[in-house]
Image (tube, rainbow, N blue to C red):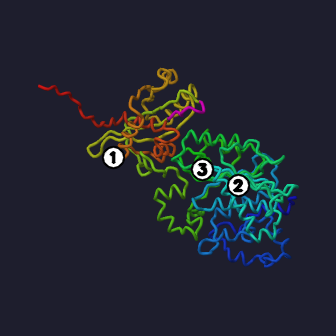
């Protein structure tokens, strides 16, 4: 039973372990009661009690070999210390649905799997804070590897076997046969169950007897971009929401991973954590997830920077690499860094231009069903050429919405009020035809419809050329994340409505010359 004293200890902010830069591990170990470091059986009860609410002390006393680096040092990142504080909440009983759900994103090689799939579940199992853990990964073999690491630890770790014998002994049936010691599930004498499954395995109704999982661990449940698509990302999210999370609405849930593709499940989590609320990211809040996005460089209130893991990644090392695409992808979890056939982040230029006229460009979806595309809205201005500079375009605004009919008309009217320089609404009419004139009736500016006959890729190629010309012919008034993500990911992005919306206006204003095809003539013999 958790007491008021226990709750106070769990609520302790661990001030001396606030971050990796100030935590003096050697001094902390020196302050540990010597009896806890004595491996003799007579101090077993003291060790068990001391680690009951302290996962970090548990890891040091029983799994120090997992904390040492190749040089034998024990060091920590900011993320490790926060993860320990988060896991301590598992010692409290869950009183309401979705109470303990955390989504974790951190640089590659931070140790998410070591902590969340081994050390912390091991601590929780040893002290019976959780009774049934289930790990899900992109594939069953991947999940089973995590279970194999757990099994090896309870089988081979003498310190654990000494103090937690029932956890380290397989559960037995009355006949003497193991209850379960398969590659996908183990049941221990203590009653603790650990199961491992691929994310697309049949998991609805997973339980052993009457027991359902009270700890759900989702680790890297998405594949790399080369074998992933927006459609698959939607199905994966549906599996998480409709098959995994309902296994037990009171279960503690940890979802950890690395972003590999714009629009992926983990990318949606990152955007929600940054405050980018939309109908795409709303599910993160609806499912009760707290987002923890650890960046490689932390800054205090005065702007002073430090590394989140100083001994592994010195600040100088991170600063030397922060301009690279590898750093953005592997350290920042930024899918904009993924290789693209079209735009790269260096293709975007920011500034202002003397605008003479502007379009509000609409690339519209006819329906607002979940499976339909978005409607892209953008404001693109035109700056005439001079003797010193060619004509250019300024992209001032870009937004994707799922609106139709009168709500879409109201949104367009709002934008016309916000951007009075707009002289016309430009609507691509490939879909919807005359429907758009019915929607945009009685506008305060002209409504111009247009149709595209070229393929998207051809139009995107001409638009990209204008971005890459020196001097660039297209400037963004400010960073436009939604548009730029689509451009970098094109043509693999989940949506390309903003690419089309901006492209329609820019290509109409600047009319880049297409390369003429070689003429084919028939020659008649004389």
Give the structural element (helix, strand or loop) at label 2.
loop
Residue at 44 percent across and 45 percent down: it is 477
Mark nearer the viewer, 1 or 2: 2
Q: Position of residue 380 (x, y in %)?
A: 43, 37
Give the structural element (helix, strand or loop) at label 3.
helix
Q: CA distance from mark 2 to mark 3?
A: 33 Å
Judge from the rendering whether residue 494 lies leftward or rightward of residue 172; answer left or right.
left
Residue 174 vs 56, above or below: the answer is above
Q: Which residue is mark 3?
A: 270
Q: Earlier in the sequence, mark 1 or mark 2?
A: 2
Can you say which quadrant of the picture contains the C terminus? top left
Q: Which residue is mark 1?
A: 469
Q: CA distance from mark 3 to mark 1?
A: 33 Å
Q: Earlier in the sequence, mark 3 or mark 1?
A: 3
Residue 58 vs 189, above or below: the answer is below
Find out whether residue 182 is within the magenta segment. Answer: no
Which stretch is magenta?
369-376
Q: Which residue is mark 2?
A: 183
Residue at 62 percent across and 74 percent down: it is 73
């Amino acid at each position: 039973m958790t007491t008021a004293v226990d709750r106070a200890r769990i609520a302790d902010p661990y001030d001396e372990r606030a971050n990796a830069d100030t935590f003096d591990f050697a001094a902390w170990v020196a302050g540990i009661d010597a009896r806890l470091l004595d491996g003799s059986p007579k101090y077993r009860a003291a060790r068990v009690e001391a680690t009951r609410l302290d996962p970090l002390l548990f890891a040091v006393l029983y799994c120090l070999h997992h904390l040492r680096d190749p040089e034998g040092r024990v060091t920590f990142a900011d993320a490790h210390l926060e993860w320990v504080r988060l896991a301590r909440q598992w010692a409290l009983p869950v009183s309401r649905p979705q109470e303990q759900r955390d989504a974790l994103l951190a640089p590659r090689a931070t140790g998410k799997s070591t902590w969340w799939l081994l050390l912390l579940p091991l601590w929780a199992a040893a002290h019976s804070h959780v009774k049934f853990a289930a790990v899900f990964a992109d594939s069953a073999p991947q999940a089973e590897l995590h279970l194999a690491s757990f099994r090896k630890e309870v089988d081979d770790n003498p310190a654990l076997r000494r103090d937690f014998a029932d956890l380290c002994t397989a559960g037995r049936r009355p006949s003497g046969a193991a209850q379960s010691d398969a590659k996908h599930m183990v049941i221990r004498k203590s009653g603790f169950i650990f199961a491992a499954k691929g994310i697309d395995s049949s998991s609805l109704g997973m339980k052993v007897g009457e027991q359902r999982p009270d700890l759900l661990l989702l680790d890297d449940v998405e594949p790399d971009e080369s074998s992933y698509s927006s459609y698959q990302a939607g199905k994966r999210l549906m599996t998480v929401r409709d098959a995994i999370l309902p296994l037990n609405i009171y279960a503690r849930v940890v979802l950890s991973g690395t972003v590999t593709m714009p629009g992926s499940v983990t990318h949606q989590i990152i955007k929600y954590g940054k405050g980018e609320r939309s109908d795409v990211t709303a599910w993160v809040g609806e499912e009760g997830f707290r987002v923890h996005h650890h960046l490689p460089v932390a800054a205090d209130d005065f702007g002073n920077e430090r590394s989140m893991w100083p001994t592994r990644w010195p600040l100088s090392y991170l600063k030397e690499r922060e301009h690279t695409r590898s750093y953005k992808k592997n350290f920042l979890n930024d899918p904009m860094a993924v290789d693209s056939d079209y735009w790269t982040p260096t293709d975007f230029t920011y500034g202002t231009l003397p605008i003479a006229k502007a379009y509000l460009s609409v690339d519209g979806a006819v329906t607002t069903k979940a499976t339909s595309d978005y409607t892209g809205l953008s404001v693109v201005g035109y700056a005439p050429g001079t003797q010193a500079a060619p004509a250019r375009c300024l992209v001032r605004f870009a937004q994707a919405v799922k609106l139709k009919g009168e709500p879409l008309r109201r949104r367009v009217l709002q934008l016309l009020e916000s951007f009075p320089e707009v002289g016309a609404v430009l609507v691509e009419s490939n879909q919807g035809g005359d429907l758009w004139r019915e929607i945009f009736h009685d506008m305060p500016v002209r409504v111009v419809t247009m149709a595209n006959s070229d393929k998207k890729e051809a139009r995107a190629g001409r638009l990209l050329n204008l971005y890459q010309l020196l001097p660039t012919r297209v400037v963004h008034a400010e960073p436009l994340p939604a548009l730029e993500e689509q451009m970098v990911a094109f043509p693999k992005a989940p949506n390309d409505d903003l690419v089309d919306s901006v492209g329609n206006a820019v290509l109409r204003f600047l009319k880049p010359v297409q390369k003429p095809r070689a003429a084919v003539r028939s020659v008649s013999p004389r």
